[in-house]
Image (tube, coloured by chain):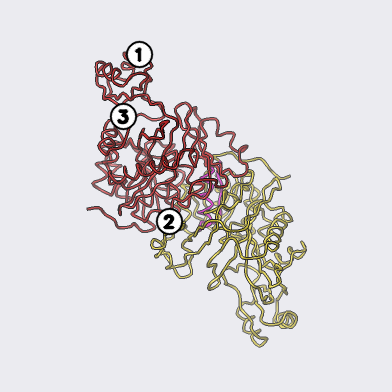
Chain colours: A red, B yellow
Amino acid sequence: MTDTHPLPPGSTIGILGGGQLGRMLALAAARLGMKTHIFCPDPQSPAFEVTPHKTVAAYDDEAALAAFADAVDVITYEFENVPAATAAFLATRKPLRPGANALAISQDRLAEKAFLTGANIAVTPYRAVTSLADLEEALVELGTPAVLKTTRMGYDGKGQRLIRERAEAESAFAALAPKPLVLEAFVPFEKEISVVVARNSHGDARAFDPAENVHRDHILHTSTVPASIAEATATEAVWVAEEIVEKLGYVGLLGVEFFVLPSGRLLVNEIAPRVHNSGHWTEAVCVTDQFEQHIRAVLNWPLGDPSRLADVVMENLIGDEVHGVIGQLGPGVAPHLYGKAEARPGRKMGHINRVAVKTTRK
Amino acid sequence: MTDTHPLPPGSTIGILGGGQLGRMLALAAARLGMKTHIFCPDPQSPAFEVTPHKTVAAYDDEAALAAFADAVDVITYEFENVPAATAAFLATRKPLRPGANALAISQDRLAEKAFLTGANIAVTPYRAVTSLADLEEALVELGTPAVLKTTRMGYDGKGQRLIRERAEAESAFAALAPKPLVLEAFVPFEKEISVVVARNSHGDARAFDPAENVHRDHILHTSTVPASIAEATATEAVWVAEEIVEKLGYVGLLGVEFFVLPSGRLLVNEIAPRVHNSGHWTEAVCVTDQFEQHIRAVLNWPLGDPSRLADVVMENLIGDEVHGVIGQLGPGVAPHLYGKAEARPGRKMGHINRVAVKTTRK
């Protein structure tokens, strides 16, 4: 039976992961009068700066996990690669939201695609690959170019190889094997959009407006809202996102990335059971932002109002880009920096939201 | 010479006072990638829950103050009653923003009124009172009713007595003496408004839209924006607020409370050298809110954009009212709870902002 009792102000939320997402979740929890306890192996975690309660330990340290579970009222996480054993261990002690099921599905590209396909949701054509023979057969079926990916632990372009022609199959396979792999057809999409959607334990689901995403070097560069897509495409994206959280019996916020085809049709590229980089725009222009929305769901609170008060472009600050932030603080600019000490190349250091008077849609 | 060098992300801001204002300042500082260190004598301070860096000590504990100053890059405060000796001690060690001058003026109702009058800014008619004879003479001059107040340490209606007729002079004087007192004429105002305004070390000043305030039991109940006042009155209020920070050479955010007379003319009731309860609406609907604006000024950063994206009513949650908050979370509602353990009568426990589509003014 699902526990739907709202946790009162003053409760402690345990957060696995101490990066910027955990940090922003902790800030949102504080605005609701909650305490937070961050669990992260990295002693330099930026989220450690926004709460006095932390555990620095490995995710398989059962003594540390047990003490953490004892210290909190509910547990959530900032990243989908929480080890299954960690999730299972914690879930027997305190409510884990979102649940282990969503975690298991989103950790494995094949499981995710199978789930979506089973829910009659269109995804990029794909084939499982466990041998070079599998790969060669899959390339015949899906054609080239195609993208070979590890089924697990890939993010920001890591763990994948573009195969332009069949002759590249062997080197691509050698680079990624012996991990389980998946070949995905190369989809001639027009743009990428995403929807962040929340569902609580009462079964209420609410989505934010779709964002149009542009990547640079495989890392999200900008999210623009409203997306320049047809109204019907926007409606369909929200519908699909709500369908996914409903089918998962999900509690929390989830990001859904879509490819928009020239016809306006949508394919789901990926889902992430957590607050999402492409939802950072919500903090600048929505009544309730994605971080508070996730926390509300985790607390069994009523979901907040995702209404958008203005148009916005979110831009990530990667590596050295953060050093120029003070010079960019013109009218309409809302910055958010993550407090990371070292601006390494490719590292997400912060973002800025450029807010403009609302022009279109809802 | 004024130091105008911007402090970089990763700097530590020391905050005197660990109440809800200190807590909200710390949350805003975190969004700019800053660390915070809270100094407060109360071990249960709500602000201690949003940073790992704290000092629990008395404001006259020089060893603790010295260590605190060593640990931070700049110092600010959440309340105007920082002892002058504390401010002076700290200011020799690290930049104190706003400066000791603004503190000294706003700590003393007489000094404040003398400053404002000297700047040609209209205030409520008043007389200094150090004896019963003073009081009786002042009552002749200002008439009844009138309000007798201590010159120092008054807030939320504490430290004052309403004198309805001259016969009440002796009992009112006895209740408040031997503290230095001030008698203020009772002004037949139509409404109360306030403006929060920031100025940075470069001399830039920016005000938020005026809010219309309603008090209940001497405690702020609601702030409504836009205020239902004439455009000319709103413009005048902003002008006066900017004039005050300019004349003070102020660095930080300051709240200015006004009485609006039936003619539309304004009298300044009080100024507060800190973020202000009547500015809590800014967090829900402005590009930059009052907390970030104060932190930016304290850091010598460019000031943010105070533009307002929607209409809003801020409502304080006092004492037990906080227990009903989950039931009030309808469309347009943005809650903020302060994480205080005990809901004592009269205690500010949180606030909610009710956001509505923008209707009027700017």
Which chain letter matches label 2? Answer: A
Q: CA distance from mark 1 to mark 2?
A: 55 Å
The x and y percentages for residue A106 are 31, 36
Residue B314 part of the magenta segment: no
The image quarter in which residue A240 lies: top left
The x and y percentages for residue B208 are 62, 55
- Kind of residue sitting beneath label 3: Arg
Please indicate whether residue A120 sits to the left or right of residue B139 in the image.
Answer: left
Q: Which mark is residue A33?
A: 2
- Kind of residue sitting beneath label 1: Glu
Where A255 falls versus A296 (above or below)? above
Kindly state the secondary structure of the residue where label 3 is placed. loop
- Residue lying farthest left? A1
Q: Nearer the viewer, residue B316 or B63?
A: B316
Query: Which mark's residue is nearer the viewer, 1 or 3?
Result: 1
Q: Is residue A107 visible?
A: yes
Q: Which residues are magenta?
A: B11-33
Please indicate whether residue B48 sits to the left or right of residue A181 in the image.
Answer: right
Q: Nearer the viewer, residue A135 or B157?
A: A135
